[in-house]
Amino acid sequence: MNKYDYIKTGLFLILLFYSCAFHGQPKTSTADTLRNIHLQEVTVTATQLDAPGTSSVIGQEAIRHIQATDLSDFSQLLPGVLTRNPNLNAPSVFTIRSATFNNATNASGTAILVDGMRWSNNANLQLTGIGDGGAMFNSSALSGTDIRSLSPASIESVEVIRGIPSARYGDATSGMVLVKSKAGVHAVSASLRLTATEKLAAFSKGWQLGAHSGILFLGADYAFSAQDARLPEQAFHRFGIQAAYSKDFTNATLRLNLRGHWTKDNDKQGANAIDGEFRKTQNQGFSFSANGEWKTNKLWISRLEYHAGVTFAHQRNETNTSYTGIQQTTTYTREPGEHEGLFLPPSYFSHLSVDGKPFTANGSLVAHLQHTLYNKVYNHFLFGLETNAEGNCGQGIQFDPLRPPLEMLNLRSRSYHDIPSIYHYTAFAEDNFTFDTGSMRTEVQAGVRLTRLQANGAPSSTSADPRLNLRQVFIERNADRLIRHLSLRAGWGLLHKMPVLAYLFPDKAYTDKKCFTYNDAENNHRLTVMHTFVTDRTLNPQLKLPVNRKFELGINFQIGNITADVVWFNEHLRNGYCATQQAEPFTYRRYDPLLGKGEQPVLTPDGISNKGTPLPSTAYTTFATYTRPQNGTEQKKQGIEYTIDLGHCNLLHTSFLINGGYLKLSEKNTALSTYYPQTEVNGKPYPYVGIYESSGFPSNLRVWQQFNTRFQCITQLPRIGLITSLTLQAVWIDKHRRGMASIYPVYYLDPEGNQHPFTQDMETDPQFAELIMKTNSLTAFETDSFSPYFLLNLRVTKKIGRSVSVAFCANNVTASNPKRFTRSTQQYTILNPDLYYGAEINIQF
């Protein structure tokens, strides 16, 4: 059975269910044989909270209905987010108000809190460097938390704060994702999901331990994903466990949550890989949190809320690569100067591993004071203290220096034990008050968050995050009036992002230049001498915290059965982290070559000598290039998000919803970056280094524009336990362009390391010709604009009896993949995700 047969079968079942619902049911309810599965209507979409600020809540029924494979799939319920197919074979991050799903700046600024415990990615060091060449296979370092380890089957609800969060939340610039795990008394639940690429299973049970002993909840899940069934070695595995304990006392509560996970990614290097080559990533860890509250009922304090938790993970990336037919020399020294180098074997396997053990410890105490100031004026004041520690105690980067990875010949091993931990000390205060004026109501949330950052070897810094959310309710009436609700809201706030270890403490940079090589295989005498230049300028003591200024205006209204929520937002992120290339001059010697047999060169403290005679040499000046963290990323975004509920048609048992958004996002790298031409002039290294506005890209400016709408039809037949949702996604505007980058440097460095302005006269000077950037295509900076395109998604959930439910899902059910011409690349682009389908069965007893 091919994929289209699955779709046809699913559609046939839907029609069969509808036929039974409308035509096959008896009129009398007393003899109804289906009364034992009569359900209440449920919410299968994201809903806006009835409070100041912009946030969406995704409940259990919506989670079950969309059949998500990881937490990032939930984002598609938010207005303005396009459909994408699940893919557990690649790192998955959560983005908010982003033009792409994998924008590293947006993802790193999205905070993930699970049962109050932050799943931080700040201490993730699964890389070999902060530049483009340092990424490891399936690592989310320098981006957001890889949330594939969190099974949707273990989640009770999710709140996504897209606007300005409460002052109690920090270390985020994009927004917050608050995850609440399943807990409490639950029937035994078992689910199995099968798709074309994944197999997922979950089991859970929650029961009362005794009349006064609390409630225990246990759960486990497993997932397997292979995007190509012919290549089982390219697969992802996930196993997770969960335990939750809760107990309510007379004036206090206690909640304990424990999670454990084990994930593994396997891959081979390519279709023509040699036996023995592989890439794999393994991640295992746990999180534990304890939280609750104590109701003091005092005049000066109503209750105390406490939280303590820890997360720990063991991450390991490994690669095994074959190199054949090489004639390379290298060195492994960490000391500057001339040293004997190493001759590499002509063929070998290179095994590289990066072992990380990131951990986070967090504790907070929040005091609440809730009281009525006077008639119809209600106040809720809170003050809290929070401390946070993050670090990594892994073994770090390891490889055999006699068999190094050739792409990283300047790499050195590094233990993460030597990297200091970072500490955050936070105090926050917030006041929430509500007062009525006649038939109107005003709600205000105002607060500030102060955070002190400390780390050994790094400068301390303090950030202040003021936050303000307002809501004015003008009309709130009973259901018998035409205009039932009208309210306006506004929000403004600053959000700072704490630094990551990789940017705070980058490794020293090593540059190795070949000075001399002699290889007399017949007489078994060979010598290679390398000059190593070491720089610690990779550290940036002026590194600042990224900060995002958020501002938004929203309106909510209900006219008859039509409910609408529209919000306009404007955000400006400054000082975002990036990595730039820098250069530093140094001088080394090249020795005259020895061409004859029987020579006996040796390295002495004064240089190379041959049979007691010093070997002549010439001094050359060149540049060492290295990567340095900077505050260069700037993002500006504005747009509109809207959700319109057209109400419920009783005749069709159907609700109609429209949501979507418009987003214009520009991202620019304002940091200066160097480029050193790897050429020689008259046998000498090129004497200049260019300093440019762009940073390793054809352009340092990118602009996206998107405008989309989702038309959703949700039909619920509670009497037979059937829910279907049919969604038409329309993309009206899809534009992307790169801003024209200057091909000329702003400055240049001379051999002494002095910086000079690059003038207009130098543009035609032959000695600076190598510094003039070349564009690969004259069309690279043209705007790519696609005409409207559409997509149809289908979800079906059917309850069978009291204990069994089945579900079917299909993305792009009509297999619509329009082809559009891309001007920047002069090629055609296929739009929309491919057809994706799956089925799930859930049993409760």
Image (cartoon, helix red, strand yellow):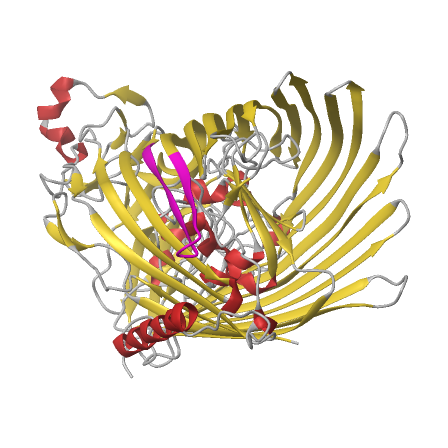
User: Which residues make up the magenta segment?
Assistant: 641-667
Q: Position of residue 96 (x, y in %)?
A: 45, 42
Q: Is residue 567 left or right of residue 454?
A: left
Asked if residue 48 lies left or right of residue 619, the reply is right
Question: In the figure, 634 relative to 710: above or below?
Answer: above
Q: Does the stretch in magenta take in 569?
A: no
Magenta stretch: includes residue 654? yes
Q: Residue at x 24, y 36 (%)?
A: 699
> Image quadrant of residue 726?
bottom left
- Residue reaching furthest front? 28
- Residue 197 appearing in the image: no
Q: Mark yes or no: residue 664 visible.
A: yes
Residue 18: image x %, image y %?
Answer: 38, 69
Q: Quadrant of the C terminus?
A: bottom right
The image shows residue 507, relative to residue 722, as above or below, that is above
Q: What residue is drawn where x is 89% and y is 33%?
A: 297
From the top left corner, tell me how far across and down residue 162 is, in percent.
Answer: 49, 37
Instruction: Say if 19 sits above or below 425 in the image.
Output: below
Q: Main secondary structure of the magenta part?
A: strand
Please provide percent x and percent y for residue 226: 39, 74
**In which quadrant of the rendered view does residue 564 lie?**
top left
Residue at screen point 29% across, 71% down: 270
Quadrant in which the N terminus is drawn: bottom left
Task: Tell me if 172 is positioned left or right of 606 in this view.
Answer: right
Q: Is residue 2 shown left or right of residue 59?
A: left
